[in-house]
Image: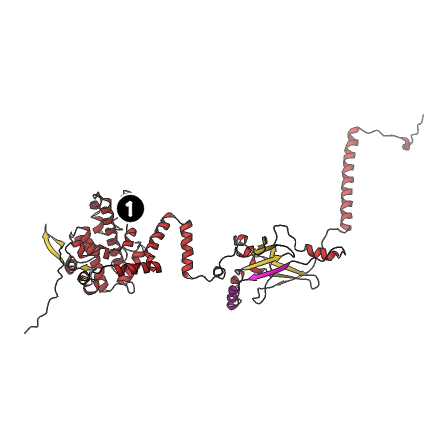
Amino acid sequence: MRMELDSSNLLVSESPQTATKKSKKKRKREKERDEGAAAAQLQNEPTINEQPRFDVKLHLVNNQFDKTPPVVGYFPSGYNPHKTNDINDAQEPNLLLAAPPSVKLYRNAQRTKVEKSSGEKNEKGRSSERLELVVSPNESNVEFVGNSYKGEAMAAQLCTYALGFFDKVTQTLKIMPIAGNKILRMEPKLRGSHAADKELATFENGEITADQRTARLRQLNVQYGPKKSIIQDKKMQALRKGDDPLSQKDLGRKIENAPINKDALESISGHGARNIPPYNSSAITPQEAYPLDGIIITGEWDFLEDIYKILQVGGEVSSNAYPTFVCNRIQKLREIQDEVAKKRLSCIFSYITHLIKFKDQHSLDGASSARNHQFPSILRQKFFEMFNPDRRRLSVEKIDLLISYVLVLTLYADDFRTFPADVSNDLRMNPATVKSHYRNLGCKMEREKNKYLIILSVPLEFPQPKRKFRKR
């Protein structure tokens, strides 16, 4: 028996697993085909937001001192100066034409002259000019002011600003610097009020004298400086009161009314004749023979407290920083109970140190020992005026004068009875030479414990010059 099967009507049943695999592959192929078609369609269609491209020529414009570069500013208040132009462009009959705001630019005249004279080499000076831009809206009491030297413009700036202009006709992009290299912040102010906020005209023009600059620096130091610097500034101002015309007038009136002792003036001599400190030959006490105020003036005592401060904190005096004469008498200084006397003697020791170090700095054999020594400015200036070192060396006369000052202070330190060994070592001199300097000061010698003791006796008796007799 034969059976014929129609293939068209034959249904072939497949397993559910095989159908599922084929359907996944089919869906994947269809998805890839659809994505490819969509991409091709996007490539063929023009993009609405795409900007046209241009081949431009770049042109850099440098500063020109005879022309003002563009001024750039912004309005943080939200004011729009172009709003009036939009109204005018509307050309509506019911709206009146609004006048645009007036714009004025102010430049510092003095700085401009300096820039023009300096030429094109001084590009940095151009960016430092002072500018002020004023935008005044029409029929308004408010105006917008921006400047390049105050407020936000004083903040640190780590970049350079430039402005670009693109000409579509010539296909050229011009890049030029902006005025003052600053983007001005336009602050709203009442008309005329910003004039009261301006600084002094001399300061704006940069025309301040040396005295004005010193006064401003001193004011900053007093307001923001450390306590030590403020105290030192007050001391210096007390010393400079002599330059004040009112103080000079008051001092002159006091001098005119002061009694004059002619006998004392005749008996007191300076160091001009004998090359020694000021002395009084008719003194009846050693303290009056060489007045200490003639050696250490009133304003200098406050700068001689280094040794006293070391003792106050219980520190040790270094032998590398201070002479042997001073170091050997520190124990004596510690034993003094009276604080006033201790402070006075410590200041004398400090003055001796500065004198010896000044001599060492201007000599060949002691320059290394005084290399790191710090002098108070008031003493350094005084020593240079007194001893006048020429080419970092002292003359023989000035060395003798400096030694005389040191020896007089050693007499004060040892109650006018001293041994010359320590100071001879500090001065790098032969003890015999130091003794001759003591004799020139009017001192006498006595032997005590196989040593020579130097004593200052009054009234002063100076050695007479020896006469030379002609041999027959």
Q: Nearer the viewer, residue 4 or 174?
A: 174
Q: Residue at x 35, y 55 (%)?
A: 237
Q: Amino acid at mark 1?
A: Lys
Q: Quadrant of residue 395?
A: bottom left
Is residue 54 left or right of 369 when viewed as pictured?
A: right
Q: Is residue 99 magenta?
A: yes
As helix, strand or loop, the secondary structure at mark 1 comes to helix
Among the 4 quarters of the image, the one containing residue 290: bottom left
- Residue 398 locus on image (x, y percent): 23, 63
- Write the start and end of the magenta stretch as one range: 95-118
Q: Is 140 above or below relative to 16?
A: below
- In the displayed structure, 245 sits above or below 321; it is below
Q: Quadrant of the C terminus?
A: bottom left
Frontmost residue, 2 versus 455? 455
**Relative image position of residue 269 (x, y in whole percent):** 19, 62
Q: Residue at x 17, y 57 (%)?
A: 289
> Seen in the image, is 11 located left or right of residue 288?
right
Give the quarter of the image for residue 177: bottom right
Residue at 36 percent across and 49 percent down: it is 228
Question: Is 18 in the magenta?
Answer: no
Q: Is residue 362 visible?
A: no
At horizontal 41% and vertical 53% (from top left) the residue drawn is 219
Depth check: give the residue in front, 271 or 418. Answer: 271
Q: Is residue 255 visible?
A: yes
Nearer-the-camera pick, 363 or 346: 346
* Chosen colour scheme: secondary structure
Quickly name the residue at label 1: 309
